[in-house]
Image (cartoon, rainbow, N blue to C red):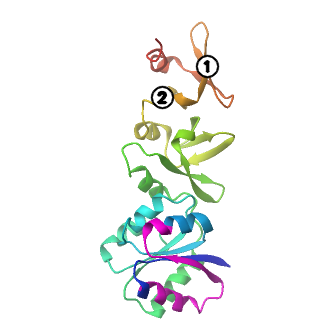
Amino acid sequence: MRKVIIVDDESAGRQLIKEYLEDYKDLILLGEANNGVDAVKLINEFKPDLVFLDIQMPGMTGFDVLTHLEELPQIIFSTAYDQYALKAFEVHAIDYLLKPYTKQRFKVAIEKLRDTVYNNARPLTESLLMETAKYPERILVQSQNKLVTIRLEDVIRIEAYGDYSKIVVGDQTYLSNYGISTLEEKLNGDIFIRVHRSSIINLNKVKELNKYTKSYDVTMLNGDVVRVSRGYMDNIKKLMY
């Protein structure tokens, strides 16, 4: 069974999807929204498996909706505009239904849904969120087989993990599709500073700094200890008064 939500600013568009869904007993409709703001609230509350999502809507677009979700469901876009098709597939949508579409075309989309293996990475969806502001307030990260959003103000530190990065939030660790150097460029350098080739710390989460003969250790509020390497010592020294 898959939980479904329909988001479309036109009642006729929502009604058509509901009619077509009647042939699929394993797809259970939980609710519907006619604008982006209500869509975000509904999706974050019910955590559906699948969302039929319009693109051009009052308040925010379908792509904007994606950047405000706590978890990413599978997406089938349903829209009257064909110019967004490429972007839709860049964010790993299951399908792109161009209005008006037939019952047979809807069936094709459902077959794609059933044949699709859930993609844990979805790097371009994460990019969509990171590009919404000069310094984003939230980012998408991987948690088991789903993606969740976290507030950057809650991040304690970031650790390099091969081509990816581990992000520590309290006692939880999440995976970002970005490498640590890419994250450093995208984050506010007044708050997040590089202290090691493999480490970035949140200055607001620092408990104390311990000085040794030729190096420093930073103790974070959660008890983690991060070594400051010689090459990044100046980043620490310039904060001392």
- Viewer-proximal residue, 232 or 70? 70
Q: Relative to 76, does residue 152 appear above or below in the rendering?
A: above
- Is residue 37 highlighted in magenta? yes
- Tell me the mark number nearer the camera, choosing from 1 and 2: 1
Q: Residue 235 placed where, x, y %?
A: 45, 21
- Is residue 20 highlighted in magenta? yes
**Residue 202 visible in the snapshot:** no
> What residue sits 49% from the left and 42% below the top?
179
Under tag 1, what secondary structure?
strand
> What residue sits 41% from the left and 64% below the top?
63
Looking at the rendering, which quadrant does residue 217 occupy?
top right
User: Residues under labels 1 and 2: Cα distance?
Assistant: 15 Å
Residue farthest toward the top in the current orientation of the protein: 213
Q: Relative to 123, does residue 33 appear above or below in the rendering?
A: below
The answer to whether residue 126 is left or right of residue 145 is left
**Badge 1: how crowded within 10 Å, few (<14), some, or many (20+)?**
few
The magenta region covers: 13-39
Q: Earlier in the sequence, mark 1 or mark 2?
A: 2
Q: What label sits on residue 208 in the rendered view?
A: 1
Q: What label sits on residue 193 in the rendered view?
A: 2
The quarter of the rendered structure image containing the N terminus is: bottom right
Q: What label sits on residue 45 in the rendered view?
A: none
Residue farthest toward the left in the current orientation of the protein: 83
Q: Residue 170 placed where, x, y %?
A: 66, 39
> What residue sits 43% from the left and 29% below the top?
190
Query: What amino acid does circle 1 point to?
Result: Glu
Query: What amino acid does circle 2 point to?
Result: Ile
Under tag 2, what secondary structure?
strand
**Residue 129 visible in the snapshot:** yes
- Viewer-proximal residue, 174 or 115? 174
Q: Residue 12 placed where, x, y %?
A: 42, 88
